[in-house]
Structure formats: C-alpha cells, structure tokens
Image (cartoon, rainbow, N blue to C red):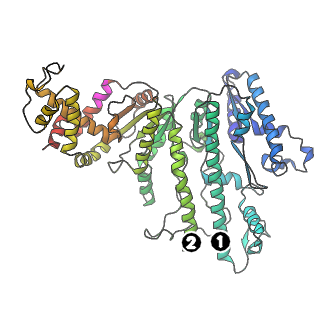
Amino acid sequence: MTDIVERFERTDHAAGDDPSERLAFFYVERELLEHVDWSRFPMSSEQKNMRDLLMQITRRELMGWWKDALKRCVQKAEASDANHAVIAFHPTIYAARRSEQYSTVGWVTASGILPDVHRVVLLIDDVFDMWERLGEHEHDLFHHSEWLRRRLEAQGIVDLIDMSSGTASPIAGKRETFDRLVLDSSQAILGRLLSWRHLDMVEAESLSSALGAPLTTLGVKHPLSALRRLLDQTVSVTAYLSHPISRPRRSRVSGEEWPPVVEISNGLSAKFADSKVVLVCPTAIDEFRLARPTEVEDLYSRSFQLSDRWPLLVSQDDAISALSPPSSRLTHIPIDQSQVNPPRGAIARSLETEIYAEVPFRDHYLVAHTDSFFVFRPLYEEGKFSGGVGAEISHWRQLADYEPSRRALFVHTMDDVRLAISGFEAMFRAEHVRNIMRMYLRSRGVDVDVIEQLLVGARLKAEMLDADSPAGAVTEKLIEDSLRRAAEVIFFGGLTALSESVDDPRVGVAISTQNSPSHAEIREYSIFLQGGQRDEAARTKYLRQIEELLQMPLESWAALRLV
C-alpha cells in the first residue's frame, strides 16, 4: 500500500497541477506510525514499522491507536483543498507474534466519523507476489527460513534443519526430509496468504455495505490509470471482463506461444478506460501456474514449481503496483524444485486444490461487484461457451433479476460465429423452431388451433386470423416473420446463453468486424455498458452479419430446420 500511495503523491506533485485537481491521500497506518511514542520500545529506526510494532502491543492498544489515526486522517481530508480525498488503510491486519488477525472494518464503521464515501476500492494481488513482498527480507512476516524454524521449534523438532547460516539448510543425511519440509511450509504460507486475501475481500464487502458505497476490486496489475479514473471520479462505471482463458492457456502449456487473443484481451482494459469504463480483468490475478503433471493419468507425477504467468495487462511501470515483476518461484529456500516424485506431487496437488477452491469465490465476487458484464469472444476456438463463462453468465442473470441497471454485452468475431453455426444447427431441431413460431404467432393474435395447422404445412388464409387482430390483413408474410423470429431467438441464445432475454434491452450482442475491436466499436460498446441503448442500426448490422455467414436470409435458415 505504501508504494502505491507514495507513487500517486510523487506523480501529482511532479505534475504541478492545481492542488484542487489532485488526489489527496491520507494513509491511516502511516498516520499511526508517525504518532507512536517510540521511546517505549527498544527498536532501531529500521524496525519502526507496523510489523515490528505489532510484536510489542496488544490488540486493545492497536484498536485505540488505529481509530485515533483514522480520525486524524478524516480531519485532514476535510480540511484539504484537494478535490478528491482518499482514505487508505488495510481492511485486516496480521500480527505475527500470536498469528492474530484484526479487522479494521469494524473500527471504521463503529467510529461513525467517515464523511460521504463515493466508492470503496480494494486492491489485491497474486498470492505468489504477496509472498515476495512479505517474505523477501529477514524478519519479514513470512520470511521462509524464519517461518519454518519457528514452526519446527513449536513442534520440538528444530534439529531437522540447520540454521547456522541464517538460511535453513539440510543436516547431513536428511536432504529429502528437508526438501519435503520446505515444500510443506511453502504450501502452508501460501495457504495463509490465500486466507488473508479472502478475509480482506469479505471485509471490504462489509465496509461497502455499511457505507452504502459501491465496491470495486482491482488486481494491482491493472493499469494505474484505471485506478486514478475511479478515485478522481472521471469514470463511474465498471464492467467485468469475461474472455477466453483456459483455451489460450492450454495452447501455451502445450509449448506454443500465447495466441493473439491474449494480447487483444489484455489491451481492452486501457481502451475502455479511455471511453470511461473501467474493465475489471480476472487475469490481473493468475494463480493457475503450478507445473502440470508429467503424466496425464497421474496427478501426483509432477514437480513443485511455477509455469508461465498470464501476460501482464500493461507494462510493470504502468501498473498500479510497480514494485517487482511477477514471482517465478514457489519456495524461497533453495532446493531443486524440478524433481518429480509422488511426495512432492502430493504437496503440489494439495496447494493446487486450495487455489482451485478460491478461484470461483474470487471471480464471482468480481462479477457481483461490477456494474456491467462484458463478454469477449466466449466461443473462441471451440464454438461454444466454456463451463466457467457459462457459470458467470448464469450469475449475471441472477444479479440482473434484482438489479435492473446491470448490462451485459457479448462481442464475437465473424470467425467465432462461423465456428459456432454448425453447433447451432445440430442443437436446435425442428421442434425448437416450431415452439418459437408458436409463441410469435400467438402474440400476433392467431388462434391456437390455426397455429397447429400452419405448423404442419396448411396454407395461411385470412379467415384463420382473429377478426379483430391487427395482423388480420397479413398472409404469408406472417409465417415468414415467425420463421425469422425463430432464427433470431436461436442465434441470440446461442451467442449469449440468454435466449430468454432476446427482448431485454439490457442485453446486447455484437459481431466485431475484426479480431481486435476498433476504436469506434469500443466507443459503441462503452456507451451501451454505461446505460445507453443499442439502436436499430446496430441490431440490423448484427443480423446482416449472421446472414452473410449463413449465405441466406434468417427465415430461410429456420425453414430448413423444419425439413
């Protein structure tokens, strides 16, 4: 947090802008440390930080000091001439001395001193990179050698490792035991960090609810510009980006380069920010990085190391946190992580299971705490929705039932739709087409018995229509319209997995003219996600694109399904 706050402060001061246009940060933990009576504690200047302070004080003392620091920050914010004040703090605090964890959110809400809050923003990171920051140096919270030593001492078995050099190393004849202890402790530390981040997310949600302010969660590998636009209120709309992940990753795991769709998907965040929508990208966090089993049929035949991370959304310098590149290691104690054997594989599999269990919570949390839902190329490579994307769509549907302002936009390419068409033809048979035609004809005032005659091939006659029906003068065109309606519903459902929402103005579907959306298309998509309507011209264009792929009118395609 400190590096992000200081980075904003340096940038604003260097720019020399009008102070009223700057973001003013008031960092509660920094304020607390500046008012500690350090003469009470025998510490060096390097130890005057939250980590070491928490080793010296009780929970009650911390609560009082923290609440006082919050009060001072709020007073300074109210007195500031800056147009946008940001109160920064950690939603939970970890004290290593007794492995205690404190929630600051209750202290915030109980204080009752926060002014009107525009937005709550939670920043999160990959668990591997969290460990780099919190375990890189001696005496850090999760310094690997110290953590392992403390745990073994607590169990009375410290003689299993050699700490004479300050870094854990094996004693004679215990290499394999040592290596397993290292891997086991790596899993324990990473599991603790996963739990810590999970708690932060739960607490941030509670804070958002208590303050009546929207919550946005950003991985710190998002563009810094996206965070700035949220904080200075340049942007007020957020959208979750659902895009191909597992399929491109499989290509990479098989030894290929990352496919072009990865770079295109990553570039959407910056493009949408320029059009006043902040995309929340799930791949700003990437923890599906454990090396795969060497044998498909044996999940435990694997090493204990990391594979490539999903490419960064933006360069490290342009990301929210620019401290260090993504971690490339699963343990901070040197061992040969490439060895493959069942005991190591069992630990790797156990860690992987913890990570898998966390992913649905995290991704669906992001879906729930964004305003809109942007689905980009969900049919990529296979012409059908993946299970993960399907689950996100279902979640959005449930949310939209209770929150009418939510939007969903599905964007495909011509190649992806072409790939999907054969699947549609196999999936949607004659009876499906007839059911849609039935509903359409009934809505036009046609009697149920007459509809059944028409659907088995009887010729439409004027007397078949209700006398007072506004469609009373319609003849063969009514059947043609019902066939076209059937095709429209089928394609809408196939391209959105939301066939029941075909007439819902909150759900849009578009086919991009190229693999990477143009600036004009991005503007069009952004307007819709912000609450604008997709006009008839956009709908007409989309239907014409489908007919171009089919090489026939929609009604002709539907009629063929009846044969």
The answer to whether 22 appears left or right of 402 in the picture is right
The answer to whether 134 appears left or right of 300 in the picture is right
| Amino acid identity at mark 1 | Asp
| Amino acid identity at mark 2 | Gln
For mark 2, what is the residue? 339
Q: Nearer the viewer, residue 223 or 377?
A: 377
Write the start and end of the magenta stretch as one range: 536-541
Q: Nearer the viewer, residue 222 or 433?
A: 433
Residue 383 in percent (x, y) is at 32, 48
Of circles 2 and 1, the one toward us is: 1
Residue 505 in percent (x, y) is at 37, 28
Residue 77 in percent (x, y) is at 74, 26
Residue 400 in percent (x, y) is at 44, 34
The answer to whether 446 appears left or right of 267 in the picture is left
Q: Label 1: few (<14), some or many (≥20) within 10 Å?
A: some
Residue at point 42%, 40% (across, down): 375
Look at the numbered disc 2 and give the secondary structure of its residue: loop
Residue at point 42%, 35% (across, down): 408
**Disc on res. 179:** 1
Image quadrant where residue 561 sits? top left
Kindly report the distance in space between the C-alpha atoms of the residues bearing marks 2 and 1: 10 Å
Residue at point 69%, 21% (across, down): 20
Q: Label 2: few (<14), some or many (≥20) within 10 Å?
A: few
